[in-house]
Amino acid sequence: MRLLHTENVEDIALGAAVLGTGGGGDPYIGKLMGISAIREFGPVTLLSLDEVDDDALIVPTAMMGAPTVMLEKLPKGDEIIKAFHALESYLGREITATMSAEAGGLNSVTPLTVAARLRIPMVDCDGMGRAFPELQMVTATLYGISSTPFAIGDEKGNSAILNTINNRWTETFSRSITVDMGCAAMIACYATTGKELKEWAVPDTMTLVESIGRTIREARRAKANIVETVREAVGGFEVFKGKIVDVRRRTEKGFARGEAVMEGVDDYASQTLELHFQNENLVAKVDGEILVSVPDLITVLDTETGEPITTETLRYGYRVTVLGIPCNERWRTPEGLELVGPRYFGYDTDWVPVEDRYGS
Amino acid sequence: MRIGVDVGGTNTDAVLMDGDKVVGWHKTPTTPDVTTGITMAIRTVLQETEVPAGQVKAVMIGTTHFTNAVVERKRLMETAAVRLGLPATECLPPMVDWPADLRETIGNHTYLVHGGHEFDGREISPLDVKEVRNVAKDIKSKGIRAVAISAVFSPVNGSFEERAAEILQGEIPDLSISLSHEIGRMGLLERENAAILNACLGDLAKNIVQSLRKALKEMEIEAPFYLSQNDGTLMGADYAEKYPVLTFASGPTNSMRGAAFLSGAQDAMVVDLGGTTSDVGMLLRGFPREASVAVEVSGVRTNFRMPDVYSFGLGGGSLVSEDPLKIGPQSVGYELTSKGLVFGGSVLTTTDLAVAGGLADIGDRGAVRHLDASFVDQALDEMQSMVEVAVDKMKTSAEPVPLILVGGGTILVSRQVKGTSEMIKPEHFPVANAIGAAIAQVGGETDRVFALAELGRDEALAQARQEATDKAVAAGAREETIVIVDVEEVPLAYLPSNAVKIRVKAVGDLAL
């Protein structure tokens, strides 16, 4: 058990961008909310997974919708509390703790507001070990945990509870409600016991993103090689180093899809990498062959500053280093690959662990 | 004839122009109060060219007065920030992410009231007239004279901000009001921040305009004067009193506009090589490309048509260490002319290398004769490569484009930069910034939502062009010289009448 103060939140938000693999939303607003909640209500208790009682009731909380809308229509602040309470009264049981549904991007910091305001602990884990675009894409789904009862709330005070036959239906319905709520809503779902959580959750991810953030901050100060320190902190592999020479974008079924083409430098001279993305980075093709793919993480860093580059900001001329990071082992099962593997995103290829290609 | 002035961190430059011809120019150190330096530069250029003050028809000034005031937290007004958005946005009040000292300097007066729109144009909640009146009473009782008004999604629909302004003005007639949708873009906090910065500069703007007017009068210049805006156009004194924040970052813009004018190139990369750092930007149809992400001004995130500029640590005064080879970012800056080797000093700088390599003939060549020729080559290669990387970073495609070099450090680059089709070092390159101010045009912009179901796209675009043109004429442009330099259409999804937001910018020559 330890306490999260405002400085920790800064580091978490910075590190979450690395696990956001190009997407997950800008953590800026979530970070400001977390910091102001901690200033007002005091630091947040972070429990490690093994400190959670087996019969505890844990509910992940998150923001759903378009992160760009949230940059304009900032939250009221208590919609997430309302959703949380709606679920609690529906369940008829007191919720013991909250947690992050995704460690990458904006939702890494969203639950801090709930934890601070309700003075409940946050668990050091998440449901992805990265960021993914859809609600059913959490490890809980692999363990038969239902996303419902599912609570969703807006700033006006509206809330709804959903019950569905599976987690993909929850994604479908909640997406429609989110649009009616103005494209930015707060959700509480995947209520789970401590015993179940220890089975499905990706452990220690808050500590991981925080240490990535701290590493970047310290390396910046020491003017050290940031890319290399980040690679070490995440246990990843350098896949490519080069320059972006072309970016193509299009909107497909409500998602921002596209490709960025990079020409190699140094050890990678004469090679070409094509990065495919759909909100997040999906696959990296080197000289026409897919060498890294979801669910492994593909993160693009500015070679000079170490700054993670989101898919929205990919632009001609950037000098970048591409890292491949092994995903959590739960995604590496047949069920995991069916849910979030390359074929789900339309790539007719088998997933090969990133360390098999780059481990030597 | 007209005079252009650009105030930089180190120097204040003035240039006297007769039509397209540069008659004379003068550089003088920037003074702490700024105005003294401006007066000195103008006075000297008039004396040296022996042009009587009466022949000056206009004075254009690019100044750092307002940026300095924010950086130094001086001469800022107490300002009320009124935001329309409740029940949304409550958890992050205005100025939440500001440096605490700046927030305290302007009083930290924030008001949240109902109003604002959804992404699709629906109202978050209706405007509550009584609630706004109560805010007005409180503002009045505190004696606050400046207000910034923001509303959620006001770039899509600015009517709530305008209505709230009417109510506040009705209660407090002498209140000076800044509306966020007139200044910034999408992104509530950043747009609101820009509006608050603008509001708190209100008194200073009046003072500066007055003191510049007085200074010009003392020099017997009766001509009107204008301030440079960061989008490359001019604003008259009245407008400048209302929108001082629009002068931020006008320096890099003036350099790039000057580069376009001097070289005749409209689409090109520009490198402005200074004493300590250099700026790279891209010209599109003669104007700088604008930044699309938040730009920080003294710790405050803003988003309002700032030029997209990349600065890197290479200039004429950059320090060079020999083993291992390292260039910048430290620099002797304005002390180059006393500290550099060729000027009799003892510090090895990039200018010394340029002299040693035969790129320039400045000062005493003998002072750099001892430098190893292969080391000099290697260092010049490194400088070349720094410029090449920076230029490539700011390009938007692999297509080669012309490169224009301006600024005092231009001597550092001699070979053609990779990825460029030609390299232009125009005449008068040291004062491209002041020339950019002198040749600036006036503009008009329209930025609003059109319902295509009623109008049709062609009609809507024509209307927007006309509005922008009318505004440019109202700002002082000669109608026959007006051209449309930018058209941007943003379709707004999920709106019943097929709405589209159209932004058109028109510019024309000043009618003198």
Image (tube, coloured by chain):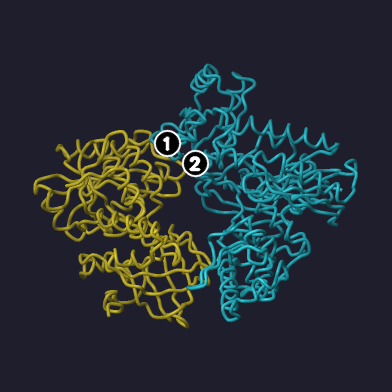
Nearer the N terminus, badge 2 or badge 1? Answer: 1
For the residues beneath circles 2 and 1, the answer to whether they share a chain is yes
Q: Name the residue nearer the viewer: A263 or B150.
A: A263
Report x, y in % for residue B425: 73, 67
Q: Residues within 10 Å of mark 1 (few under 14, many from 20)?
A: many
Which chain is painted in yellow?
A
- Considering only vertical position in the picture, is B53 above or below A330? above
**Direction from residue A87 to residue B466 in the image, left or right:** right
Image location (x, y in percent) of residue A343? 32, 71
Seen from the viewer's position, the closer of residues B68 and A142 is: B68
Above or below — where is A228 with respect to B39?
below
The dot on residue B188 is 2
Q: Give chain B's shade.
A: cyan
Question: Which chain contains the residue that carries disc 2?
Answer: B
Q: Chain of mark 1?
A: B
Q: Amino acid at mark 2?
A: Leu
- What is the quadrant of residue B278 in the picture? bottom right
Identify the secondary structure beneath mark 1: loop
- Residue at position x 42%, y 40% from top? A74
At label 1, the amino acid type is Thr
Q: Position of residue B102 (x, y in %)?
A: 49, 36
**Tag shown at residue B89:** 1
Instruction: Decide if residue B441 is on the left or right side of residue B130.
Output: right
The answer to which of B36 and A216 lies nearer the viewer is: B36
User: In which quadrant is the C terminus of chain A drawn?
Assistant: bottom left
Measured as percent of width and height from the top left, residue B397 is found at: 59, 69
Q: Are marks 2 and 1 in contact (CB under 8 Å)?
A: yes
Q: Residues within 10 Å of mark 2 (few under 14, many from 20)?
A: many
Image quadrant where residue B408 sits: bottom right
The local secondary structure at tag 2 comes to helix
